[in-house]
Amino acid sequence: MRKFAFSLVALLALALPAAAQNVCGSQGACVQQVPTRPDAAIAVQMGTNTGTVNTQSVATVSVPGGLFAYVTGIYLDACGNATGSASTNVNFTSTGLSGNPSWSFSATAANLTSTCLRLGDSFATPLKSSAPGTNVVITSPAATTNTGYTIRVYYYFAP
Amino acid sequence: MKRFLIALIAALWAGIASAQVAIQQNPTHLDAATAVAFAQAAAGAASTATITVPSGQYAYITGIGIDLAQNATGAVVTNVNTTAMVNVSGGPQWSFSCVATANTNCVGVRENFPVPLKSAAPGTNVSLTATPSAQSQFTVRIYYYVAP
């Protein structure tokens, strides 16, 4: 009996680490055994006029009073149509972020003919907006004849 | 007998350890992506990647990759947007343009989220559809894990 108990404990010790990793349901969907992540981004603010040529795009994260926006990623697309237009030192600009950073690019018309430039950053530690209740706004370069702009701002709100 | 049992267990343990090569001495990474919703339809057809979210759980998206590849004919892609991502607040979209060059890859999407993106409603699937022009093919990958 003692030998049996000893063996059982040993087998359990070997088996437990594998079993603790995740739980898979009958449909094969596995659920990670990790608690709710309160700092996950829970929304994406798209800019206006997504991908529409000859328009400016503006993404506005409307921050509730007393709270901050925590930005986990900002991604920007500039896609040209089959004609293409040159862009010279143009910027996606921001407000509501300390320092009001910009993202810049230049491209020849050929470099923006039927192709896209992709800019942006993601953050291992979120970027907190500069003041509570103040919107975070990302604005594309001015309307460009043959270029469409797309903006995605990933974020959550918290004190 | 007791000594024999202890020696046997130790030998078994050592055997298992020696059979596994270069194991990191790190605990299980519980917020690692554990799956990829993947879709790749034929050229000209819509590719829809779907995360099946179990009841009461959310999808935590850790990365998105989208490829756009021209086939042996090629056709221009002009300011095409994906559909809005379903069950992600804000419904993000991605934009594409591409020259008509046979057998060429267009500028794809590579977005990684060190802080994951959580789906909007529990127990509701997340999906993303990308529809190309006739001679090009979208491949969609959504990296994720499921948790409360």
Image: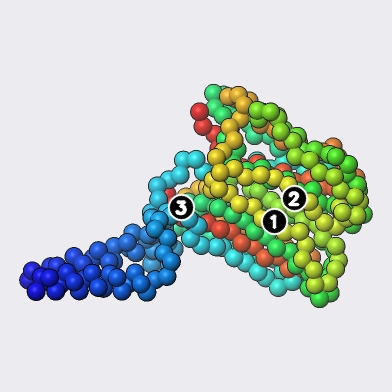
Instruction: Pick the residue in front: B46 or A89.
Output: A89
Is residue B25 shown above or below A58? below
Q: Earlier in the sequence, mark 3 or mark 1?
A: 3
The reply to the same-chain question for discs 3 and 2 is no
Of A92 and B137, nearer the camera is: A92
Dot 3: element: loop
Q: Chain of mark 3?
A: B
Tell me if residue B90 can be seen. Answer: no
The image quadrant of residue A144 is: top right
Q: Are marks 3 and 1 in contact (CB under 8 Å)?
A: no
Q: Chain of mark 1?
A: B
The residue labelled by disc 1 is B109
Which amino acid, by three-letter code, is at mark 2? Arg
- Judged left or right of residue B34, residue A18 is left
Q: Is residue A74 visible?
A: yes
Query: Residue at label 3?
Result: B31
Q: Position of residue B39 (x, y in %)?
A: 62, 67
Give the vertical position of B26 relative to B11 (above or below). above
Point out the residue furthest to the bottom here. Answer: B72
From the top left corner, tell me how far across and down residue B5 is, in percent: 15, 72
Disc 3 with disc 1 on a shared chain: yes
Q: Which secondary structure, mark 2?
A: strand
Q: Which mark is residue A118?
A: 2
Q: To which chain does the residue with label 2 belong? A: A
* Disc on res. B93: none
Residue A136, by quadrant, is top right
